Image: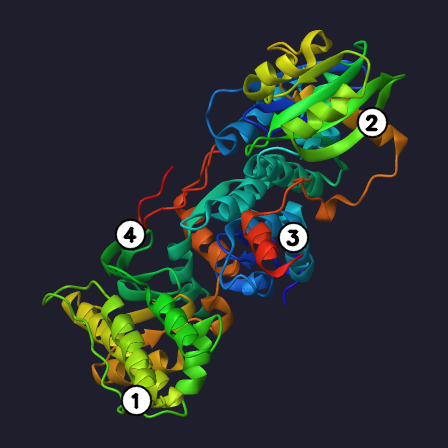
Amino acid sequence: MFILGVDTATSVAGAAVIEEDRLISERFVNNLKTHSENIIPMIKQVMDDAGIKPDHLHAIAVTGGPGSFTGLRIGMSVAKTMGQVLNIPVIAISTLRMLAWNVYGVNGIICPVLDARRNQVYTAVYRSAPGDFEELLNPAALEIDRLVSGLMQFDEGVTFVGDGIPVFGPFLKERLGEKAHFGTLINSRPRAAAAAELGLAKLKAGRLPDPMFLQPVYLRKSEAELTWEKKHGS
Amino acid sequence: MKGVDTVSGQVVILGIETSCDETSAAVVADGRTTLSNIISSQVPVHQKFGGVVPEIASRKHVELVNSVIQEALNEAKVTFRDLSAVAVTYGPGLVGALLVGVSSAKAAAYSLDLPLIGVNHIESHIYANFLAKPDLELPVICLVVSGGHTDLVYIENHGNFRLLGQTRDDAAGEAFDKIARAIGLGYPGGPLIDRLAMEGDPEIVDFPRAYLESGSFDFSFSGLKSFALNYLNRVSMTGGEVNKADFAAGFQKAVVDVLVDKTLAAASEYKVRDILLAGGVAANSRLRKEILCRAGGMGLRVTYPDPVFCTDNAAMVACAGYYKYRRGEFAPLTLNAVPGLKLGADKY
């Protein structure tokens, strides 16, 4: 069974092919080129490296959000359309869960942080459990201060991963002291292989939603809607 | 509608259009037979904001694009395997909106190992005329008028476009929208002014017409718009009341006169026998009547698309794509959205 993983949720673009218990090929770029230009040629490359054609795929896993609105839509449009053409399932995997998967098994809790601007992060809190995670905080867009107060309640170490680290790392270190640990270059960005691996697990568990109307989870409304609601009430 | 068995041997193109606020997909055979043309309009979604919100439009596109494609295939009674190529609008337009269509089209082309064709949105509006009349002979002069564009184009042969003139400020459709709002008609303004003007006398208010320097094929509607807004102000300040129908009729005639005069002048200068209209404002009844009447007097023929092909739709994208298919102008899988794409300046 071959699964293609696709990720364009943050400044990273990634593609990977896994076959059951083997990661066969993976590409990762964070080269400031647009995802639109990068992603299909990257998919073609990992497929070629795996020696398979699109017809051989059994499912496509894609970053489901949160992340850059435009980035999420590029990945989602690609994954949904490939799934539609090839008539195979499309599985959306939370960007935050994918990031946590990079450090699965560490002691304490795991807190992915994506820079959401305006002093906010897209975040969630996980603890490793057998084969999966226990979700201690659902994905949300939070003020960094509110996240820190929440994390203070846990009497254990916190491992941060995600592109929020360069922005908020010093602040988190200052507030949480010795409890704060930070991911490294190789595990602090989303990996398409993680989407594929988590997608495979979801596929095996069954109960997948219809991919036809699949949408990214943005965790934030558009500016225009927020302004309108401020004026008229929601 | 033709079935799948009659399609074999033909060039069958899937067109995808997401440049603004319509999500559309269509299947067109040989650039002339529209097997399906599904348009999902977002107008109601944007209405409360008084115009198109790019982020909301993009979100809607990603939600709807696949079901719209599926409906287009189903109605055409074809499957993905029957397609010869995938054509998509890659500019000009809203970048986030364009990217949804471009990403989908590239994914389909790669998965099916089919040629990918990137289409300029303005070019596709022009090609809506070839859906109506595939045997149209070139060269022609085409007036492209919509909410975003007012372009006068000379087309010598397929794929060879020369922009003779364009608006220096507001697009014609934009002027219609602004004036409609000023007299409380709502959005989108073009069709509403068209309807109201039918009951009015265009000679009551003397609107100015901007012809710019002699020989220029450029347009300008900002002076006309300012005059209209000042006129409304002046009347309301002196406690008078504007007859909206007369006002709409006069405004519309001022816009149409300039559009028609310049188009006919271009037709004479370039010695063409055919004139095409394209874009949303090409559905305006006064424009159609006026240009038909005056061009007829000069021995020129006028072609315009059915109203459904004047709005943004994917059948015209598939049609324009067909002519590029015949010329072998295929796009690489790195094709990107180009929000400011110029006519005749393909970015691949």
Tell me, yes or no, whether dots 1 and 3 are on the same chain. yes
Residue B254 vertical placement versus A115 (above, below): below
**Which residue occupies the foreground of this view, B35 or A25?**
A25
Q: Say which residue label 3 marks.
A: B64
Q: Quadrant of the C terminus of chain B?
A: top left
Residue mark closest to the camera, 4 vs 3: 3
Compare marks 1 and 4 and give the one earlier in the sequence. Answer: 4
Residue farthest toward the top in the current orientation of the protein: A178
Name the image quarter holding the N terminus of chain B.
bottom right
> Disc 2 sits on a residue from what chain?
A
- Residue type pointed to by label 3: Leu
Tell me the kind of residue under disc 1: Pro
Q: Are marks 4 and 3 in contact (CB under 8 Å)?
A: no
**In 3D space, how far apart are the residues under numbered discs 2 and 4 (Cα atoms)?**
59 Å
Q: Which amino acid does label 2 sit on?
A: Glu
Residue B160 marker? 4
Q: Is residue B333 left or right of residue A87?
A: left
